[in-house]
Image (cartoon, rainbow, N blue to C red):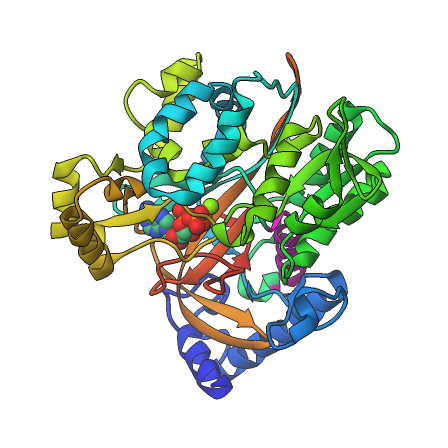
Amino acid sequence: AALRGRRRVARAAMSAEARPGVAPAEEGAATPGQQQALLAEMVENAAVWCAVHGLVVGDRANQRSGTVPGVGLVHAPFSLLPARFPASFWKQACELAPIFNELVDRVSLDGEFLQAALSRTKQVDEFTARLLQIHEKMMPINKKEDIRLGLHRSDYMLDSETNSLLQIELNTISSSFPGLGSLVSELHRTLLNQYGKILGLDPKRIPQNWAATQFAEALGKAWAEYNNDSAVVLMVVQPEERNMYDQYWLVNHLKESYGVATIRKTLAQVEAEGQVLTDGTLVIDGRTVAVVYFRAGYAPTDYPSEVEWRARLLMEQSSAIKCPSISYHLVGTKKIQQELAKPNVLERFLDNKEDIAKLRKSFAGLWSLDNEEIVKSAIEKPDLFVLKPQREGGGNNIYGHDLRDTLIKLQKEQGESLAAYILMQRIFPKASLTPLVRGGDWFEDLTISELGIYGAYLRNKDKVILNNQSGYLMRTKVSSSNEGGVAAGFAVLDSVLLT
Ligand code: ADP
Ligand code: MG
Ligand code: MG
């Protein structure tokens, strides 16, 4: 397989379609053999860089790699060179971050809107129903979250048909890769510092990426607002986590820059070791928790029993700062994304007309399935749509033939089953040839990229303490694959080369 990879890279090195830098800077500047040797050298240097800079994940091949830190590490999958991205769209995406942050906050305060918008979904989607139940329990006691912390990631693709930047989704819980994502930008800059001249690529065109330190800053500032020197940050994690080093980067920055300690607990451990005191203080294993940072709890599989749901409720009832609160979590559902895209809905939450126009420009077509005409079109032309359930974490969407079959099946079932999904316009980014590195092996393939812009938001009552764009994450996947998750094994980590 390695040999085939090399041949394909050699062939691509001569192609004008290749990601810039894989092609010779000048025609005839290097023979295919020299190109191939150069790439092999770069791959090796890059892999070493990953190892000595902590751009690593747990190796699937090692059973203990998801539970024991420091055991069974492998470099994270990455693309060898940054993805070209037009500077104008880059600027547009960055400008949207603080507006989306504010939107999430405003929508989160409208409990009735959230309950109403998800009322049909909850009848057919057990997971959403459970989240809404917790939300509902908080409403009558009028529980105020004075201090609100959001660590979001808004994902975009460039649609080649319309030449526009369109939002894929907005993540309000467990936005992953702030740690490793910033390292990939560093890796690419390092490679271009060495090879940029030969490749004709300028390392200065890779934007700075401070996602890890900026997320740590937001967590640190939230901790400071809580105002208890002996309190800790609680990171809620899955029992097995091969992406733990991405999380440990934040833990490290929090400790080093803010002197804040982090404890890691699973939902089951929170239930076993946690209590809420009469004044609302959340105490886990004897330690007061200032901030609960969720890196688990976004998928039904995170709640295998009632134990985990009790833990979620317990934390929500406490006065600890939740990142996210149940309301912020719900705002990030696909159904709410679709509701917000309806005419006149943004106007309910935001005042600034320019901001509203900017958001709306980034919305792709989104429809609920009670729109019979759209369902009919999707059955006729399934390739123009994506069918999405209320799920997170990649690998849940339905495409093509499956989309058609599913819609036909759902239509036949009487009742509300269609309400579990939304339909979205399919976005078609332009594909380019890219060398990808995974597990020390490299190969070249046609790929498409998805740009994630991180946003951090922190407020205490009327005071907005932070509302920032906080770095970025480029993910690149083989264009024949529908889904995009890195952890799920579909994509590699990447960075941006502004054009
Ligand atoms: P999740 O919350 O599981 O990440 P997403 O909405 O991000 O759900 O979908 C997962 C992946 O599916 C995305 O990363 C992207 O690769 C692909 N995808 C999602 N929506 C679209 C779309 N409208 N057009 C093309 N691809 C899409
Ligand atoms: Mg998501
Ligand atoms: Mg996604």
**Depth check, front residue: 333 or 77:** 333
**Residue 235's x, y, as percent?**
70, 45
Q: How many marks?
A: 0
**Residue 115's x, y, as percent?**
41, 25
Quadrant in which residue 129 is drawn = top left
**Residue 485's x, y, as percent?**
48, 57
Q: Is residue 377 visible?
A: yes
**Residue 390's x, y, as percent?**
39, 44
**Depth check, front residue: 70 or 97:** 70
Find out whether residue 422 is within the magenta segment.
Answer: no
Q: Identify whether 331 is placed above or below 64.
A: above
Q: Is residue 163 visible?
A: no
Q: Identify whether 8 is placed above or below 392.
A: below
Find out whether residue 185 is within the magenta segment.
Answer: yes
Q: Identify whether 8 is placed above or below 317.
A: below
Q: Which residues are magenta?
A: 177-195
